[in-house]
Image (tube, rainbow, N blue to C red):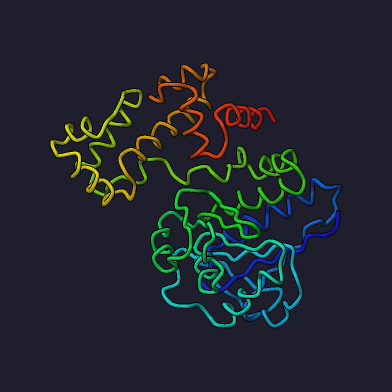
Amino acid sequence: MPVQSVAIVVYEGIQALDVAGPMDVFSETNTFLDGSSLYETVLVAAHRNPLRASNGMQLVADLTFEEATGGFDIVLIAGSPTPPEAEPDQALVQWVKELPWRSSVYGSICTGAFVLGYAGLLDDRRVTTHWQDARALAARFPRAKVEPDLIYVRDGRLITAAGVTAGIDLGLALVGQRHGAETALKVAKRLVVVAQRQGGQSQFSPYLTASADPESPIARIQDHVMGNIGARHTLDSLAAVVGMSSRNLVRHFVQASGITPHEFIDRARVDAARMMLEATDRPLKAVAFDCGFGSADRMRVVFSTHIGVTPVQYRASFRRAESE
């Protein structure tokens, strides 16, 4: 196979793992391909002066934007712990604007998505970023179709990943697409990653959308759902738990968590099913019943929507990763 050229865009205050994660994926992949350097990765920045990452690590670019005039197979923009408050350096934005013409696949990790947005590359595209910054991304770039709950999202040649370690998942996805799932799994094991998370898998458990106040009515409802995952929950029954009307429940729930009560219930059931599929050999019908789906068919639909694979595929993938 021909060499794959990879460029990772860096700047002051970058999240070091956004850079090191994908770089290590591509580097380790080379060791499983007869020692051939099938991935050549360079860092690109506005200058060659040392850049300090958010953790204090110093990085030095291999190429400046002026020097990186050729094409790349893959270009990824690393992120920083917090999104930029204003438009980034014009040299950076201008170089990124040309990515559709200078690269086969381009994208971002974490808040690197904001740089894509300032370059006008998120309009009408499905994208993701760190879950804490998803609302800010959607507000700043309203034409972007932000998916706040996904590990990574691919929309044509654009691929975006969630926060920090999701850059490893993005790298593994690109390796798996080119070299097959078996190679990606070997790389994941080498990096002590249990298995590559599917792009459709949630960034976080249902509890991470909980109200900040653990004594709030919304937190009590969420605790009630998680503690009675196999029960049938309706708006009226949940409203009765905290003594409010169903209309007020929906309004307060969305304000506190960003999702509806029904969506939270689905996420909670999926999370419970995922853990049961990983830890037990119970039949799918039993898992569906225990997690409150009512039927294996219903569980398959909801599970696939949130995780991106069916329960059968998820269990098989998890067991295979354990046995490798």
Horizontal side of 264 relative to 234 (left or right) equals right
Which of the two residues, 102 or 53, is positioned nearer the viewer here? 102
Residue 272 against residue 195 in the figure, above or below: above
Q: What is the quadrant of residue 206 in the picture?
A: top left
Horizontal side of 303 relative to 207 (left or right) equals right
Q: Please give the name of the residue rendered at 28% of the width and 34% of the height, measured from the top-left corner.
A: 223
Q: Please give the name of the residue rendered at 13% of the width and 36% of the height, measured from the top-left corner.
A: 243
Give percent across and percent down for residue 251.
23, 48
Q: Please give the name of the residue rendered at 55% of the width and 74% of the height, measured from the top-left corner.
A: 119
Give percent across and percent down for residue 101.
70, 71
Horizontal side of 249 relative to 29 (left or right) equals left
Residue 171 against residue 59 in the figure, above or below: above
Which of the two residues, 278 or 13, is positioned nearer the viewer here? 278
Give percent across and percent down for residue 194.
60, 37
* Label tally: 0
Which of the two residues, 264 or 21, is positioned nearer the viewer here? 264
Residue 69 against residue 6 in the figure, above or below: below
Residue 144 against residue 68 in the figure, above or below: above
Q: Please give the name of the residue rendered at 30% of the width and 31% of the height, measured from the top-left corner.
A: 225
Q: What is the quadrant of residue 246 in the picture?
A: top left
Give percent across and percent down for residue 48.
66, 80
Image quadrant holding the C terminus, namely top right
